[in-house]
Amino acid sequence: MRQILVYSTQLMETGGIESHLLEFCKQMSGNNILIDLVVLNSQVSPAVEAAYKTYCRGLYLGKNKSATQRLLWLTSIAIKLQLRRYDALYTNGQGESIGVFAGLVRTKGVWVHHHHTSGDKEDQATWGSNYIKTLKKADTIIACSGRNAHAVSLALDRAIDTIPCFSRKISVPDTEAGVPDKIKFGYYGRLIPEKGIDTLCKLSEDRDLKDVEFHIWGEGQQYPASFFQKYPKLHYHGTFTGISGLTATIASINAFLLLSVHPEGLPICLLEAMSAGLPWLATDRGGIPDIACDPYSTRVIAVDSSYEQIKQQVSSFAEDIRQGKISKETQEQLYSEKFSAAALVQRWSDALALN
């Protein structure tokens, strides 16, 4: 029986890396593999916690407020787990505590750290001194895409491996052919300014886009439901739960829109859209260009595009969808070959030396 110790700096209720980590535990557990999960700062719901308990032998979720309390809690958990000799340590996220935790626990196998943001100059500026030590000391560093791996490799002067995050395969029924009255663009995920929420709001009010609808799912302190009342033409739907909610969301829109300036790694939302064959338009951040597989259904625009440039791209995209120029087969095939769970389990097993 092999044992993996998984450590994450934080888990929010929703988010791309949150989705990856749950799928990681789901896909990697079983087949003579046991997983213990430790999270320094957990804000997940009881339902999500119950899901983790399904896949993990041990679940240790820190819910302390202060930094001192968190450090004391983390130390106590590490001491408790020292009696176990883990076959692999998988750490995830970005923070000063990762190296501290790795130094306290005992493993007889490899330490693999997963850096899941872009790795570019902007991202590097957020790395603390202890986190840089983590990136230099871990046996293996995994990035989400080749582009990100190259950026981190240049910064650290060491080899960086590439394995995509886990995502959920979404299947939506084919609908009858026909031109919709309005092309529906949607975004779901964290509601933070870096994800282009304000631009989506502005686009919804633009008279030149009267044949386009904009839909948003998610939550964030800066964007309560009352915020969207100022934009009556924007459709705000709150949050959804589970794969059924995600499937219904993807089935209800014609394209996904990610106008992000965040240091993206390889956004899970785009992988999920790809799995369903949903076309998307996104800004050129992190590993996003790595999954652009054709010029019609997967479109990448400059991150510093002006509002007018974004509007033109959205309008052009909507017109191509209206004219039936978009095909879903290329995306679905690429997802199956490179990003599905079946394709990734072996790669992660190899990286963790579990074979």
Image (tube, rainbow, N blue to C red):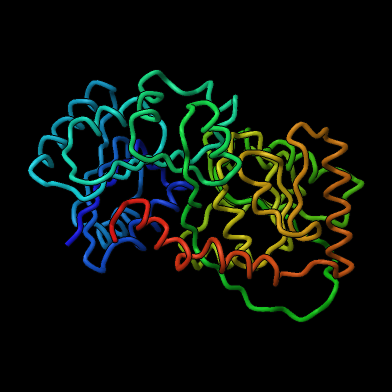
Question: What residue is shown at x 42% (from left), y 20% (from top)?
Answer: 128
Of 233 and 203, nearer the camera is 203
Q: Residue furthest toward the top?
A: 129
Q: Quick check: can you spot residue 250?
A: yes
Q: In this rendering, would 25 be left or right of 274? A: left
Q: Position of residue 259 (x, y in %)?
A: 70, 41
Q: Residue furthest toward the right?
A: 208
Q: Position of residue 343 (x, y in %)?
A: 48, 65
Q: Which image quarter is the C terminus in?
A: bottom left
Q: Residue furthest toward the bottom?
A: 176
Q: Is residue 250 above or below residue 191?
A: below
Of 327 and 152, nearer the camera is 152
Q: In this rendering, would 319 be left or right of 50? A: right
Q: Which quadrant holds residue 113?
A: top left
Q: Position of residue 246 (x, y in %)?
A: 54, 62
Q: Is residue 196 above or below residue 121?
A: below
Question: What residue is shown at x 86% (from left), y 39% (from top)?
Answer: 309
Q: Which quadrant holds residue 141?
A: top left
Q: In this rendering, would 40 be left or right of 3? A: right
Q: Quick check: can you spot residue 15?
A: no
Q: Is residue 242 above or below residue 131?
A: below
Question: What residue is shown at x 49% (from left), y 27% (from top)?
Answer: 157
Q: Which image quarter is the N terminus in?
A: bottom left
Count of residue discs: 0
Question: What residue is shown at x 50% (from left), y 47% (from top)?
Answer: 162
Q: Position of residue 280 (x, y in %)?
A: 71, 55
Of 19 and 202, nearer the camera is 19
Of 89 and 239, nearer the camera is 89
